[in-house]
Image (cartoon, grey):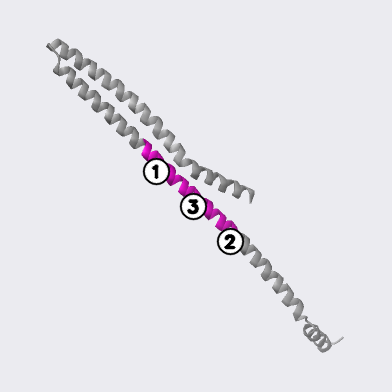
Amino acid sequence: MTKTAAKTEEAMDAAAFDASKATDQFRAFAENGMEQSKQAYDKLRSNAEYAQKSMESTFETAKQAGTEMSKKSLSAMRTNTELGFAHVEALMQAKSISEIVELQTAFVRKSMELAMEQARDFQAASTKATEEVMKPMKDAFEKSVKELEAA
């Protein structure tokens, strides 16, 4: 076969190219791409919704924790105020300097004990609140890590 004959045969093979097969292959490729895009979008939307719910839960928990801490603060102030007024009344009824010193010593001791108790209560409440506020975000993070490990 001569070079000219070989080139003519190649040209005929190119002319025999089936455009419908190429169109079908392109269509299949495009459909596959669309399906993958839909799956990626659905996963992204699902993760965004989960993140939004986690944030809403976190904010609601933070609001509740703040309310609880405010109630504890008000209760502590009320207790301390009542203790102070009771002490002033007792001092006004004292008959001697030694009784005043005794009342003052008892008041300071009781105030310190109460302050320590209130500090423990605040610490426990704030620790609990922190754990509760962080739980939804911690769960979301752990879920993301598991999904990444699975992928």
Q: Is residue 11 left or right of residue 115?
A: right
Report, in whole angstroms, how far the alpha carbon at label 1 lies from the one at label 2: 33 Å
Identify the residue at the far right of this view. 1
Q: Nearer the viewer, mark 2 or mark 3?
A: 3
Most foreground residue, 71 or 102: 71
The residue pinned by badge 3 equals 52
Please give left or right for residue 82 compared with residue 93 in the image.
right
The residue mark sitting in front, 1 or 2, is 1
Disc 2 crowd rating (10 Å Cα; few below 14, some 14-19, many 20+) is: few
Q: Image quadrant for the N terminus? A: bottom right
Task: Pinpoint residue 50: horizontal percent, then vertical percent.
Answer: 53, 51
Q: Up-down: is 26 above or below 48?
A: below
Which of 118/26 is in front? 118
- What amino acid type is highlighted by mark number 1? Lys
Instruction: State whether the magenta stretch is mostly helix, strand or loop.
Output: helix
Magenta-drawn segment? 40-68
Q: Earlier in the sequence, mark 1 or mark 2?
A: 2
Residue corresponding to mark 1 = 63
* Element type where label 1 sits in the image: helix
Q: Residues within 10 Å of mark 3 (few under 14, many from 20)?
A: few
Under mark 3, the amino acid is: Gln
Q: Secondary structure at mark 3?
A: helix
